[in-house]
């Protein structure tokens, strides 16, 4: 059974960089798309972007200028970096497997446990 | 971006009721529509993908239908464990977008 384990700080200062890592266990990291999704307190879900195991990425245009995703297959990890954070970036951040369920049809079929990240001085 | 609009935003229902949740896309997304269930303090879980395919392990009282811009999640015979928030999500194009959620509460 594939499991995703998230790690990273829960508190980030304004204007600094938010960094989170997701470690994949029980399965392969290769051949899959891996997404990050966030949820501000009491609100809905926002897709941040995905990275493929080759390193190619697709970012939400609303965050693209501040966003970098990476993958380290040797460590079975993929990561998120969001620069110049503000209070608006306060949210629960989830990593998820962006699985091809049927040809061309993607869905988030496995999720990490979530990391509450608060942006505050 | 494709906007996803769910209705209602919340509903109250009793155990055993049949519940319908609607999701409308701002443009045609064919059948590229998924549904998720989220319980308080937990990550969302995939319920239905490609409009009507039930995720492995999910109960058959959940079903999905629709095409183009209008989609429906149906819960037949609501069970206590079904009280949660449900989100639709389109995978037709990026950025992937979600509906705002429908909270199903106990009447």
Image (cartoon, rainbow, N blue to C red):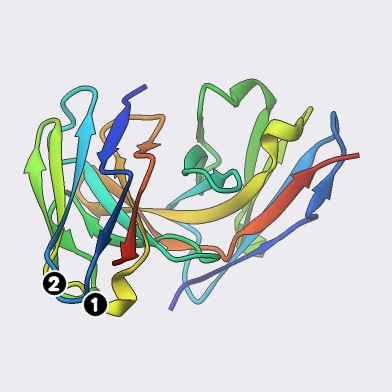
Residue A64, placed above or below residue B65 = above
What residue would you read off at disc 2?
B61
Task: Tell me if mark 2 has few (under 14), some (14-19) or many (20+) residues whose alpha carbon lies within 10 angstroms of its own.
Answer: few
Residue at 47% from the left image edge and 57% from the top image edge:
A30
Q: Which residue is mark 1?
A: B79
Residue in view at x 59 percent, y 43 percent: A40
**Tags 1 and 2 touching, CB below 8 Å:** yes
**For this rendering, which residue is in front, A109 or A70?**
A109
Kind of element beneath mark 2: loop
Q: Earlier in the sequence, mark 1 or mark 2?
A: 2
* Dot 1: chain letter: B
Which residue does the image show at 52% across and 43% down from the upper left?
Answer: A43
Say which quadrant the N terminus of chain B sits in. top left
Q: Quadrant of residue B3?
A: top left
A46, A68: nearer the viewer: A46
Quarter holding the C terminus of chain B is bottom left
Give residue A32's position: percent from left, percent from top. 42, 53
């Amino acid at each position: 059974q594939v499991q995703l384990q998230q790690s990273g700080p829960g508190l980030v200062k304004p204007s600094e960089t938010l960094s989170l890592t997701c470690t994949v266990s029980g399965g392969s990291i290769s051949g899959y798309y891996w997404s990050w999704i966030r949820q501000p307190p009491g609100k809905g879900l926002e897709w941040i972007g995905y990275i493929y195991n080759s390193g190619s990425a697709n970012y939400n245009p609303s965050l693209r200028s501040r966003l970098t995703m990476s993958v380290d297959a040797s460590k079975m990890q993929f990561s998120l970096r969001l620069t110049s954070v503000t209070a608006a970036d306060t949210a629960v951040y989830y990593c998820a497997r962006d699985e091809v369920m049927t040809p061309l049809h993607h869905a988030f079929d496995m999720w990490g446990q979530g990391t509450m990240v608060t942006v505050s001085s | 971006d494709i906007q996803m609009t769910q209705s209602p935003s919340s509903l109250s229902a009793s155990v055993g009721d049949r519940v319908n949740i609607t999701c409308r896309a701002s443009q045609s997304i064919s059948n590229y529509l998924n549904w998720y269930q989220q319980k308080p303090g937990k990550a969302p879980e995939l319920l239905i993908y490609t409009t009507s395919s039930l995720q492995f392990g999910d109960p058959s009282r959940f079903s999905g239908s629709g095409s183009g811009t209008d989609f429906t999640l149906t819960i037949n015979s609501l069970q206590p464990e079904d009280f949660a928030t449900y989100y639709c999500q389109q995978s037709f194009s990026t950025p992937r977008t979600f509906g705002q959620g429908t909270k199903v509460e106990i009447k």
